[in-house]
Amino acid sequence: MLTTKKIGALAACCAALFAPFASAQSTVGNGYIDSASFEVGTNPQQRMYRIAVQSDWDKRWFAGNGRHLSGYWEGNLALWRLNSYENVRGQNKNMAAIGFTPVFRYQNDNKLGLYGEIGIGVNLFSTLYKNEDKELSTAFQFGDHIGIGYTTQKWDFGLKYQHYSNASIKSPNAGANWFIAKAAYRF
């Protein structure tokens, strides 16, 4: 069981791992990575651990009253731990997923404080998902989320609800849903 203390330590380790790469990128050109994150997702059937890097768009739409719409690109790598693989309770299976998501974020002009965000991206799974009477028949999945969070000068903490589905490209397409906690370190 992950505690808040362990989640914080894992987020700090993830940020430390990405810091040298981001610093190197910043000295060459404009810099491509603005932050790195660690996320923990849960639902009754499985757990997810995900690392990601983000790149801000530096665009502003619908600006007014000190707030605007902007966003970022995110690339991520996740590990899913299934606990009822092929509908056998107690049969565990690990699977990996790699994803890319454009995310729209409504935030303060200084990018600090409360924000809300939505995103929809593409993901590729290492194996087909079949767990707890739910099955996704393709390794390609869309991943969409809606979230809220709070950003400081160096940290971004968020909560989001995420849904994976292949948009009925092929059946069965039961979908997989997650509640996710995120901690990101901003470079």
Image: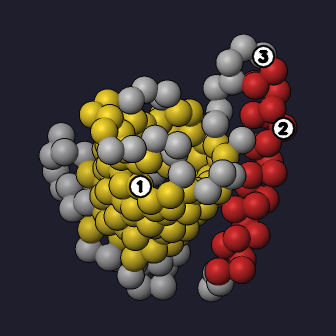
- Quarter of the view holding residue 65: top left
Q: Amino acid at mark 2?
A: Pro
Q: Earlier in the sequence, mark 3 or mark 2?
A: 2
Q: Does 35 sit left or right of 80 as displayed?
A: right
Q: Does 151 sit left or right of 14 as displayed?
A: left
- Residue 51 in the image, given as x and y percentages of width and height: 62, 52
Q: Amino acid at mark 3?
A: Val
- Residue 60 in the image, given as x and y percentages of width and height: 38, 29
Circle 1 or circle 3, nearest the eye: 1
- Residue 127 in the image, given as x and y percentages of width and height: 45, 51
- Residue 63 in the image, given as x and y percentages of width and height: 32, 35
User: In this figure, which residue is indicated by the disc labeled 3?
Assistant: 28
**Image mark for residue 20:** 2
Q: Residue at x 18, y 40 (%)?
A: 169
User: In this figure, which residue is indicated by the disc labeled 1?
Assistant: 115
Q: Residue at x 37, y 44 (%)?
A: 67
Q: Residue at x 40, y 70 (%)?
A: 179
**Image mark for residue 18:** none
How far is the residue under mark 2 from the one under mark 1?
28 Å
For disc 2, the neighbor class at 10 Å (few under 14, some 14 to 19, many from 20) is few
